[in-house]
Structures are given as C-alpha cells and as structure tokens.
Amino acid sequence: MSFLYNQALKNFDAEPKKIFFYNLKKNFSGEEVKKKVLFYEEILKKKIIKNICLNIPNSVDWAIIYIAADNVCENVWILNPSRISSINKNEFIKANSIDCIVNEKKNQEGIELDFYNLTKEKNKSKKLARRDILFTSGTSGAPKGVMISEESYIYVAQKLVSELKQTKNDLELLSMPFFHSFGLVRLRSVLLSKSSCLIVDGLKDFPKIYEFSKKNKITGLSLVPSGLEIIKMLLKNKISDFTKSINYIEIGSSFINDDLRVWLKKNFTKTNIIHHYGMTEASRAFLRPRGAKDDFKIPNNWIGNPLEGVKFKLLTSKGNENLGELLLKGKNLFENYVYSEKKISKRGWFHTKDMCQIKNGKLFLMGRTDNQVNIGGEKVQLEEIEKILVSLKMVHDATAFKIQDKILGEKIAAIVKTEKHESYKKLKDSINDEFKKFPTFYKPKIIFTLKPLIRTQNGKKIRDEKQIMDYLL
C-alpha cells in the first residue's frame, strides 16, 4: 500500500459528496468512487493478483482499477492500447507472470478483466512495494519496460502542486495518457491537492470538453504543445470563454513554436504556466515558465531551471567541454528497465541521449546523440539541418537523414513537405541561399513531397533511408 490508495480513500472519506472524478457523461462523488475502488480491490484480492496489466484508454474506470491495484498488486504493467499489437500477447503474459489483463469492452460500455495463471500456487506472504512498469517504445522505437516507484512519482507531484499552486478547488482536464508518466504524475497531483479532474481520452471530443468547461469551469490543463495547438485552432475567437477560468497549465516536453508562445502570452495573462523537460524515465527534470512569464529574449531551446533535487552533467569531449550528452540523477528518476536490454548506469546516471550545450550558465537542447551523423569526418546534428529548413515559410515539415550517394559517398538528405508542386523551384533556391553560410557538407540533397512525413507510432521521426524511400514510393 502506498500513497495512491491511502490518499484517494482519505479524500473520498473526508468529502463523500464532493465530485472528484468526471467524464463527459457522468460525475462521480467521493462516495461512489470509493465504492468502486473497494469492489475491484476485493476481486483482485480473491484472485491473488500480483501482476496486473492495464490495456485500456484513459477513463474513470482506468483510474479506479489503478487505485485498487495499489493495495493488492506488486507490479502494474501499463500498455498503450494502440500498440498492443506490437507484442506477442502469450509471450508477454508468460515472460512477466501476468495474472490479469484489464481490457476495454468491445461494446465500449465498460471494462473486462481477463485472468491468467490462477491455478498456480502463489506466495501469499506480505506484498512487496508496488511499482509501475510503463511499456513504451520510447524515442528509438524499440520496446522497453520502464520501472517507476511510487516515491519517484510523489516527489515530482509534490514539486508540481507547489509550483502550480494547485488547490482542492481546482478542476483539471486530465487528458494526458495514463500510459505515460506525464498523465500518472498529473493523477497524483490531483489526489495530493484534493482537487477534481475530468478524465478523457485525449482531445478528440474537445467541443464537448469546451461545453463542459463553460458549465463546470475547468481551472487546470495538462497538455503537450500539439494539444494546445488543437485548442488554439478550434476556439479561435472564443478562447476568452475558455481561458478566464484557467489557473494553471503544465505543458509536456515537446518543442513549442513562436506562434504558440505569443498566443499563450497574449491569452493566458494571469495563468501559471510551466513547460517541462523530461521523459518516461525522468518524468520532469527541468521547468520553464511560459505564458505571461515567457522571456522572448531567451532562445526557445532553453530547457529551463532544474527541478529541486535533480543533478545533471554533460558527457563532453576534449576541447568541447560545454557540449555533450545530458546525464541526469535524482529522486525523479525511474528504477530500471525490464523487458529490455537497456540498463541504467551503474553509478545511477541516466543517459538521456539528448545533446545539450551550456551557455552563460543555462542549458540548451541542441539535438539527439542518435541523430548526430559523421559526414567526411565532420559531426553534423540532423536537427540543426531541420531547424534551418522549417524556418522557411513554404516548408511545413522536414526530416534530415544520412544517405549513401553513388558519387559523393556519405551525404545528408532531407525530405521536405510542402503544399504545392509549383513552389519547388522557388523553395529550392531559398534553401540553396540559406545553406550558403554553412560548410558544404551541411547542404542536404532535397526530396520534396506533398505527403505527411513518415513517423513511428509514437510520433518520432523515422530517419532510415530505406524506410523513407519505400514510403515515398
């Protein structure tokens, strides 16, 4: 038993009539939620479920079973429902001694529990401390299980509640996926502050979310930049109806463009906004003020101030002591990897694979170590090439990658998405002009396309030459 179960029941007992959880069709009082938690807890106890796997989209039911499992199970495996097909179900169950998989019912009226291994003898001794194992493909696309302890979650949640000034009077739109540490820490922040939340599966029903907010006054948002872009696009002139009640926003770690920065500064003048740098393994490591507090003099790739208790250093090379891979250590860190060959450093340092640079005491994100290529003995960061390309007005997206040219050997290429064929010549001239100021090996071979660029299931750019060419054909 850890914070999650104890704090939830404490909240529900203290205010049984208060609405703690909402979905877009119904609200759930503390009394109702507690009854559901105890119902599922009893089922899990009777079946002696030690390893449970959650395989359903964000929902109130998801949160309730997750809280119930906290008092019974030792390992909670959390899958992204859209990626379950990427693993062999039988092998997964056997390799991880899964006792129960929670699935969404096909008729979408609720959930179902599939039980396994119920005939085997189980150790009924005292339960070990519960841990989450987030099954994700991460940045590289390779499957991995990221093991996270309750202490890590709570450490971050406590810092965020304080930073965002979250109180029991807040009502948060909790749309961030629970198969990622972003959503799981937000759930704990809601419980820790004794506030309420509207639990939805992303923003696909945003018109209904907007109507809900007009009636109930959502005061907190937790979104990635693409989610903010959706709100910006859909609300347009109605944005003031939505923003006037928002007290705080936490923005996920993706890059945020200048148009969105200006929009946030203009429309959320009294909102406490933080933009975090982090990932599944490190949750939040750096926090940057946004909205009215955004300083446009500071480049957009500054990742912010380190979270209290976070240690960091750069893995540098001789002669370049200010540029290198970012390494992290602290209470916000995950425990280890399972179901993967990856391991955390023996000294406890997490290798982020992010290239960072220190300038005037501030840390700036420069790119990824796995996106740094060697061209004729010179190291080139592919994100640098992309940044130049997407700065041009006619370019909607770009992916740089290394190719084998029959004449020149290793070379950089870039697939560039535009909207019109007739812009190709003009755009090519603009690209040539832009790269005149750079060494010749920086200039990429350009491939134009009208198609959306190929990405992994979790939205990361694919840079493999064969995959890209096969996709274009």
Image (cartoon, grey):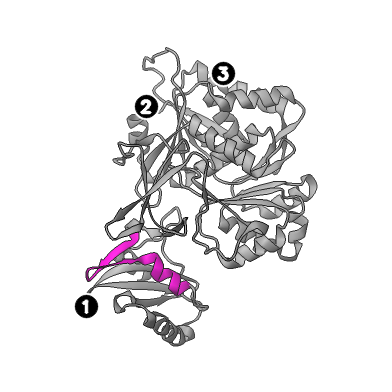
Residue 436 placed where, x, y %?
Answer: 37, 83
Q: Which amino acid does label 3 sit on?
A: Glu
Which numbered disc covers residue 97? 2
Q: Which amino acid does label 2 sit on?
A: Ser
Helix, strand or loop at mark 3: helix
Front tag of 2 and 1: 1
**Residues under labels 3 and 1: Cα distance?**
68 Å
The residue that appears at 61% across and 37% down in the rendered structure is 189
Q: Position of residue 31 (x, y in %)?
A: 72, 25
Mark 3, residue position: 42
Q: Where is residue 229 in the image (x, y as percent from the top left)?
A: 61, 61
Residue 126 relative to residue 168: left or right: left
Q: In this view, does 136 lie to the left or right of 342?
A: right
Tell me the crowding category of disc 1: few under 14, some 14 to 19, or many 20 or more residues within 10 angstroms, Cα based. Answer: few
Residue 454 colored magenta? no
Asked if one can make out residue 22 in the rendered structure from this viewpoint, the answer is: no
Q: Provide the residue designation for mark 1.
A: 408
- Distance between mark 3 and mark 2 Cα atoms: 21 Å
Residue placed most toward the observer, 247 or 51: 247
Which badge, 3 or 1, is on the more N-terminal residue? 3
Q: Give the range drawn in magenta.
A: 371-390
Judge left or right: residue 373 versus residue 29.
left
Who comes first in sequence, dot 2 or dot 1? 2
